[in-house]
Image (cartoon, rainbow, N blue to C red):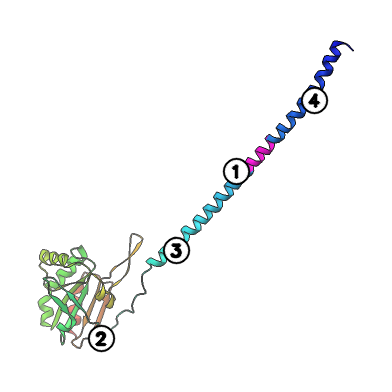
Amino acid sequence: MSKKSRKKSSKTPSGIATAKKKTPTKRATTQTKSAKTQRTQASKSTRTVAKAGSHKAASKQLNSSKSASAPAKAKPALTEGQRAPAFRLPRDGGDVVSLADYAGRKLVLFFYPRADTPGCTREAIDFTRLADAFSAAGTALLGISADPLRAQEKFRDKHSLGMPLISDEKHEMLEAYGAWGEKSMYGKSFLGVLRTTILLGADGKVARVWRNVRVDGHADEVLEAARGL
C-alpha cells in the first residue's frame, strides 16, 4: 500500500470519529433549546397564574371595600302625623337647644346642606325676612346643618340671620328627620344633607314635610302652611 493510500485511510476513520463526536453536541444543543423553551413556557404559565390570582385577590379586595363602605340602610322617612323625634344639640352662641324648649308651639325646622353657600344663604335670608310674620303665627324657626358652630356663627353674623342655627356634626338629628342621605354631583354619589323643611304642630307632631326643596318662594309657602295650622 502506498503512502497516499495509508494517509487517506488514516484520515477516514478520524473523520468518521469526528462526525460521531459532533452528533451528540447537536443533540445536546437541541435538548438545551427544548429545555429553555419548556422553562420559558412554564415561567409564562406561572406568571399568568400569578397574575390571575392577583386579579382575583384585587377583585375580592375591591368587593370587600365596596361592601365595607356601603352606607347603612336609610331610616324610614318621617311622615305627617308622626310624633317629632326628640333632639338636644348645640346652637350658635354656645347654648343648647332641644325639642322640649318649643313645647306647645309650632316650629319650623329647615335643614340646609352648608352654611354660606348660595342656595342656603338665600333660604336663610328669606326665613329671616319673614321671622316676624312667623312669630305672629305662633311659629318658631330653627336652621340645622352639619356645619360646626364656628361656621354657623360666621354665617349668622355675615347675613344678620334671625333664628337659632343648630350644629349637628354627628348627623343624629339629620338622620332622625330624614334629612341625611345619598346625593349625587358630577356623576359621583356621596352622603350629605338633603335640603328639607319640616313644620311641627303645637302638639309636637309633624304637620308638613317638604323634601328636595327649591329655595325660591319656599319660605313664603311654609309661612302660609304655618298660618293654616
Q: Are marks 4 and 2 in contact (CB under 8 Å)?
A: no
Query: Where is the C terminus found, in terms of image quarters?
Result: bottom left
**Mark 4 residue type:** Ile
Q: Which residue is mark 1?
A: 40
> Along the horizontal axis of the image, is 206 left or right of 103?
right
Mark found first going from the N terminus, 4 or 1? 4
User: Which quarter of the picture shows residue 110?
Assistant: bottom left
Instruction: Give the magenta-colored segment's residue range.
Output: 29-37
Query: Looking at the rendered structure, which numbered label has been put on residue 83?
Result: 2
> Along the horizontal axis of the image, is 120 left or right of 66?
left
How far apart are the alpha carbons under marks 2 and 3? Answer: 40 Å
Q: Which residue is mark 3?
A: 63
Q: Which residue is mark 4?
A: 16
Above or below, 216 relative to 34: below
How far apart are the alpha carbons under marks 1 and 2? Answer: 74 Å
> Along the horizontal axis of the image, is 116 left or right of 60?
left
Q: Are marks 3 and 4 in contact (CB under 8 Å)?
A: no
Residue 31 is a magenta residue: yes
**Mark 3 residue type:** Asn
How far apart are the alpha carbons under marks 4 and 2? Answer: 110 Å
